[in-house]
């Protein structure tokens, strides 16, 4: 099956620092990956679409300079939360699509900014 | 905007069958219907996917009427471990760049 690995599973950082989250497709190539954010008791909100070899496409209201996305290879996309603040604390989830398997999600990253 | 509408929450008891219905009135011809399960602090996990009529796997069944404007996820004999949020999504699985937009999901609570 299609497996998506996300790392780290949780991270605590100080306010003002940057944090990088990795999303890897382990057994398939993903030209497109997606990044979601989820606050407690809420649904997943799509942040951006990560495209291999090109710029990410951000959803309305998502600051592209704050949430840097890099999709350097067909198996890796990274999300960097720059100058993190407590309000950025959330659960971040990535996903990738493979034609015969549909969408597979990573296990998520719990970010806490203190 | 999400393309689906589901009940916000449902309660059930162990051993009962649970049916969760999802409305997707504007489903497109190429769209498939997929259901995911999510536990707290985990990513969504695939349950079942279908296009029309009925699909069954080892954990659930999916019923889709002919007009495809709704679908029903059926969980037979639920257990406490089935307490989770269930999301219904529609999308073109042939297009890897298709964006999945989540609705509110249905929070299922299974009681002893």
Image (cartoon, coloured by chain):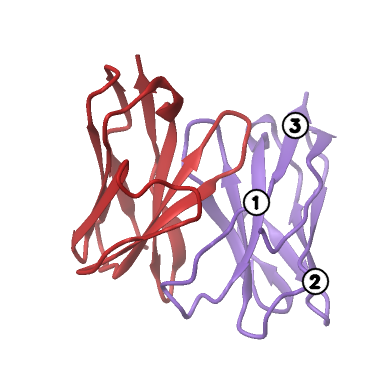
Q: Disc 2 designates what residue?
A: B25
Co-location on one chain, circles 3 and 2: yes
* Left or right for B86, reference A66: right
Marks 1 and 3, the one that precedes in the sequence: 1
Co-location on one chain, circles 1 and 2: yes
Mark 1 vs mark 2: in front: 2
* Residue A1 image position (x, y, % from top left): 37, 63
Marks 3 and 2, the one that precedes in the sequence: 2
Residue drawn where x is 63% and y is 30% of the image: A41
Q: Disc 1 designates what residue?
A: B87
Q: CA distance from mark 1 to mark 2?
A: 16 Å
State the residue in front, B73 or A97: A97
Place residue B96 in its image quadrant.
Answer: bottom left
Q: Disc 3 designates what residue?
A: B109
State the residue in front, A113 or A99: A113
* Element assignment for label 1: strand
Near mark 3 (Cα within 10 A), the count class, few <14, some 14-19 or many ≥20, is some
* Residue A73 image position (x, y, % from top left): 17, 63
Marks 1 and 2, the one that precedes in the sequence: 2
* Left or right for A47, reference B58: left
Mark 1 vs mark 3: in front: 1
Q: Chain of mark 2?
A: B
Q: Chain of mark 3?
A: B
């Amino acid at each position: 099956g299609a497996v998506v690995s996300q790392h780290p599973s949780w991270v605590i950082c100080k306010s003002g620092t940057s944090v990088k989250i990795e999303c890897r497709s382990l057994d398939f190539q993903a030209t497109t990956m997606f990044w979601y954010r989820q606050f407690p008791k809420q649904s997943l909100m799509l942040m951006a679409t990560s495209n291999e070899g090109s710029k990410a496409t951000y959803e309305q209201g998502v600051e592209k300079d704050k949430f840097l996305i890099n999709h350097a290879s067909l198996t890796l996309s990274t999300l960097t939360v720059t100058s993190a603040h407590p309000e950025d604390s959330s659960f971040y989830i990535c996903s990738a699509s493979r034609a015969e398997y549909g969408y597979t999600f990573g296990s998520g990253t719990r970010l806490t900014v203190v | 905007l999400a393309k689906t509408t589901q009940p916000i929450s449902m309660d059930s008891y162990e051993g009962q069958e649970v049916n969760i219905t999802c409305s997707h009135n504007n489903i497109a011809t190429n769209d498939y219907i997929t259901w995911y399960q999510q536990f707290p602090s985990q990513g969504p996990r695939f349950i079942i996917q279908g296009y029309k009529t009925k699909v069954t796997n080892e954990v659930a069944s999916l019923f889709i009427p002919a007009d495809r404007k709704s679908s029903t996820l059926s969980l037979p004999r639920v257990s406490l471990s089935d307490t989770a949020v269930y999301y219904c999504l529609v999308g073109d699985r042939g297009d890897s760049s298709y964006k999945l937009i989540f609705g509110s999901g249905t929070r299922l609570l299974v009681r002893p």
